[in-house]
Image: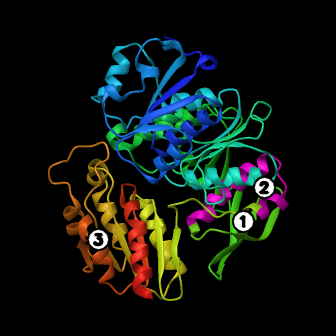
Amino acid sequence: MELDFKNITQIYFLGIGGIGMSALARYFNANGKSVSGYDKTPTKLTDELIAEGINIRFEDNIRLIPTSIKELPYKIENILIVYTPAIPKDHSELIYFKENGFVIKKRAEVLGMITENSFAIAVAGTHGKTTTSSLIAHIFKTANLDPSAFLGGITQNYNTNLLLSSNAKENNLVVVEADEYDRSFLTLHPEIGVITSVDADHLDIYGDEKYMQESYSLFAQQVKSKLILKSSIVNKINSEKMAITYSVSDDRANYFAQNIRIENGNYHYEIVTPTNIFADLTLGLPGLHNVENSLAAVAVACEMNISEVDIRKALKTFRGVKRRFDYQIKTDELVFIDDYAHHPEELKAIINSAKEMYPDKKITGIFQPHLYSRTRDFADDFARSLDLLDECILMEIYPARELPMEGVNSKMLLDKMKSTNKSISQKSDLVEEVNKRKLEVLLTLGAGDIDMFVEPIKNSLLKNSL
């Protein structure tokens, strides 16, 4: 059955608590649709969706699907089922919807339909896309361009993963995070496309790095107007379109940074553009990798003729994204930072940023590996990145959508690490384990449910400091 988007009155989400799915749920809810859904476990994000009036259940049971969707009288053509690839194929509700002729679309397909008639800016990449897309949206907001934005994280400035234009019917400017998982970004045809990185990832889906790079090349070919690439990946992307390049270190790029320095915990630098030099910029985020992310965002802004005044103001006032170098405690005695890093390159970036910001302090990291397949595929790289820590605590692997793999566990990573200051902690012992240690800078790292421990760790550390 073909989808008539205008006539849809009810949307049911399978996996509604995901960061991308929740943004779509909020979008439809704000547009007056009846929104409900399922997720495996309650989270802070699902609590927020429920508070916004969305009906969410946490049990895979077709008898609990809302009667307005499941039972007559209803018009099946007015109902849309949206699912995330993280939902297993044997999920009983997904099977029910398939067997009963409902219109079922992946999250990425729906995002593609929403943005197909918009002036879309899409940001893709293995790392950096959430911060970059959020910063682009913030620059647009600062310049009073009134964008909509579908983001892969909760922005600190706006406390949401969805920005809605005040008049979406008149203003069709939209920023989207383009997800490479399951080739989802190939549903998008943006006016401006940004690719921040193409490091190997999701090899359980792609099989090898070459096939993944081919997918990014296909995405690049779908960009309608301007393609913006980090200069170091230009040779990995096959596209007939002339790329606009950026780099934090390569002065041959169209946009590059120079005279980078840290003062009082802030990065100050210059950006050289094809026509100008933006002198003495201040970025409200720590980390050299975020200076590079800002270059991508500034390239987009300049290509859209946004003024230097607005760009400068936006960089200084951007507060980042939750779980991206997210300060929980920041005192002279103790720093506690939470980060979503779950790939070896991301771990390396966050750990090096912490060492750069706090060169004389001991860096302790708690890392929860995410997915058995990713841990297996990049075990040596994970070990090298984790060895950058002065002290490492490993949690057991968060399986997400996967079943256990023989011989793949956190002890395997621990054995590969050269560091001698390393250990494994069970979830039940984690807070107590943290309290035993003399901490200076603490990092919690990972994309699983390690975020559930951030508040308990924070509260315990603050209590013990009194």
Which residue lies at the image location 60% right of the left edge and 26% below the top edge? 113
Residue 213 in sight:
yes
Principal secondary structure, stretch drawn in magenta: helix
Identity, as a three-letter code, of the amino acid under mark 1: Thr
Start and end of the magenta stretch?
289-313
Q: In the drawing, does residue 2 fall left or right of residue 212?
A: right
- Note whether 379 is above or below 424 in the view shown: above
Q: How is the image coloured?
A: rainbow
Which of the numbered marks, if any, corresponds to residue 317? 1
Q: In which quadrant of the rendered view does residue 423 lie?
A: bottom left
Of the image marks 3 and 1, the number of the one nearer the N terminus = 1
Q: In which quadrant of the rendered view does residue 5 lie?
A: top right
Identity, as a three-letter code, of the amino acid under mark 2: Thr
**What residue sits right under mark 3 in the picture?**
430
Label 1 Cα crowd, 10 Å radius (few <14 / some 14-19 / many 20+): some
**What residue sits right under mark 2 in the picture?**
142
Label 2 Cα crowd, 10 Å radius (few <14 / some 14-19 / many 20+): many
- Distance between mark 3 and mark 1 Cα atoms: 35 Å
Q: Is residue 293 magenta?
A: yes
- Tell me, yes or no, whether the two marked residues, 3 and 1, touch with CB atoms within 8 Å: no
